[in-house]
Image: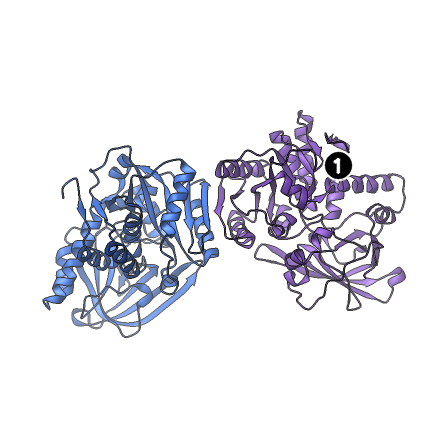
Chain colours: A blue, B purple
Amino acid sequence: MSREGYILTERDLRALAIGAALLGTGGGGNPYVGMLRTRTLMRAGAEVRIVPLDALPDDVAVGVVGGIGAPVVGVEKFEEGAECLRALRAVEAASRVTFGALISGEIGGANSMEPVITSAQSGLPVLDGDGMGRAFPEVQMSTFMIYGARPAPSAVADEKGNVVVYQQVLDMYWLETLARGTTVQMGAAAGFAIAPMRMDFVRRTAVPGTVTQAIALGHTILEARARRRDVIAEVCRAANARVFFTGKIVDVRRELIGGFARGKAVIAGADAWAGAQAEIAIQNENLVLWIDGEPAVIVPDLIMNLERDTGEPITTEMLRYGQRVAVIGLPAHDLLKTHAALKVVGPAAFGYPDLVYRPLTAEGAAA
Amino acid sequence: MSREGYILTERDLRALAIGAALLGTGGGGNPYVGMLRTRTLMRAGAEVRIVPLDALPDDVAVGVVGGIGAPVVGVEKFEEGAECLRALRAVEAASRVTFGALISGEIGGANSMEPVITSAQSGLPVLDGDGMGRAFPEVQMSTFMIYGARPAPSAVADEKGNVVVYQQVLDMYWLETLARGTTVQMGAAAGFAIAPMRMDFVRRTAVPGTVTQAIALGHTILEARARRRDVIAEVCRAANARVFFTGKIVDVRRELIGGFARGKAVIAGADAWAGAQAEIAIQNENLVLWIDGEPAVIVPDLIMNLERDTGEPITTEMLRYGQRVAVIGLPAHDLLKTHAALKVVGPAAFGYPDLVYRPLTAEGAAA
């Protein structure tokens, strides 16, 4: 990609929604509504430019925008459409800084679309990268926060017109706590914008190329379907992923606790895994895959459930008894595997202190 | 009082704490710690000037500061001391307005002291008046909010250094909801500052003279005690109040629900009320007094429990089985009895839709 980047086409937009849903690892919310909203803006003349991380000068102020809330709420409570833009403008006013570019905090799921929508509304370019390379449930779980981004001033805006600014917060955990509390009061879904970051900081700390990666994955899925190829095999080839389990969902438990969907899914094995049993722990996203009691893929590595026949990614809120699924695993980006990162996004951070993270190798097998 | 007002003395400060506790109608938190804090600042050279509502030009920006949270938490979780000042400065920054004076939103209880402390820290004068003439549990229950003060930008600050700004809120109820939510996350106690009001608006909508009234009531109590007079009789004479019941507390129920102390107290009658039974409904403050099932005093009129022998006001969190009490009632200010006000602070607003408010007359008897 040239330093000028590229203008997002409608076809790319559709592919981005599909690829981002896959990288959502079961969470992050559904990008479909955001895709429709962006398409409407594009058809009305809006242009969205995707630019590489080396396109802009060091001192450009970069804004992270995204939705905050429980994905299961997003299914019923749609955004008004300009929540993130209002949050972004509030951060600009509170910080006396004018943003020059946008980036997704979380390429997985609906938050892949929020910078794109806000770009279509504001004209700001979208950087090709994000803060996770996947989806995570909490604000502090991004490479930006892990590597020292300032947590304030940040802002939350709802669809009714309320805007709350976190003018000073002690750290990223307090930002998460306070913003999550506001979001629950607002009805468990809101637009979020985080304090300005300098472009040179973003260049060092973003997971690079993930917008383009998500678009490419989406095109792979669409093309494989159109040509009636094996979608799951094509996805694994394109994403450097591997099938870890196939089978039928025999149990799903989910609870909405403090704005989060927590639970687990149990899968009875089929094909090569006939007679085996897998369990997946869920906290908005798929966190850990056990096969016959042994951990096979562990957060921050990516775990995705795909519908066995169509290759459609299944989000955790859409898991149902009887679904036939393939579970694929994919190594996380190296920025998520440092000591500093594992403290925030490793298994202990999700309540599994005894689970030792063993990274998937490039070949897709557990080391 | 002259338009220059007066400088608060240490003796006045002590009287203010006592009178404000009385006007707290059982709630509003204990002003004692705030009194000690202010005294320390005064002994270090700080001056607090109380000025009447006609002292300052129309365009002066007036700030309301106060604590927000459940009073029962304030008993154990002390403030760091500059929470309200930090919230005030955050509102100044967010509104681009410089405050010229402070006023209490709530003269009853601890919030009588917060503008005094902030005055000692900032040098701003304190206006002689407040937004309630008593205490109420929620942000929107002030004459300022009832008569149209802008609810944003307002701010909350905690003792750890977090500052949250409500940059845009739909109305005073949303301010209450969002600020209450933040306060619960912060540990159920924080400093609060509300959007700037113009002096001419405050002059029309404040309950006037209540700082001086609280100081005078405090002096009355101190003097009656020193001279071994009947404190309750003296208070009734000074405040134009009347004894509605005396007896012994025989039951107290309290729960902390969503940051509020809710409950009821039952009193077995003594003296002229021997054989009768009274019940007081509590939501942080005393809300309704029933005698033998008949409503005798109804919010917004003031209901205070005093210790029978010492005349000491008893806050709702200090009510105990076996206490001997006198229950006195006092008419609320007319600003709290309009149709607009009763929608916000009448019995229906507190969950008693079938209770018809009948104002106490000047003689202290129910009309």
Depth check, front residue: A12 or B309: A12
Q: Quadrant of the N terminus of chain B?
A: top right
Residue B355 is at least partly visible in this image: yes
Q: Which residue is mark 1?
A: B14
* Count of numbered circles on the image: 1
Corner quadrant of residue B281: bottom right
Q: For the residue carrying disc 1, how many other residues have a C-alpha within 10 Å: few (<14), some (14-19), or many (20+)?
A: some
Q: Position of residue B54 (x, y in %)?
A: 70, 36
In the displayed structure, A246 sits above or below A109; it is below
Query: Residue reaching furthest bottom?
Result: A322
Kindly identify which chain the residue marked by label 1 belongs to: B
| Snapshot quadrant of residue A41 | bottom left
**Secondary structure found at label 1:** helix
The answer to whether residue A230 is seen in the rendering is no
Furthest residue in direction top, as rendered: B45
> Horizontally, is A275 left or right of B295 in the view?
left
Relative to B283, residue A149 above or below: above
Q: Position of residue A317 (x, y in %)?
A: 33, 65
Amino acid type of disc 1? Arg
Q: Is residue A38 left or right of residue B211?
A: left
Quadrant of the frame with the C terminus of chain B: bottom right
Q: Residue A285, image x and y in percent? A: 32, 58
Point out residue A111 in the picture as x, y percentages from the top left corner.
31, 53
Residue A264 vs residue B19, the one in the foreground: B19
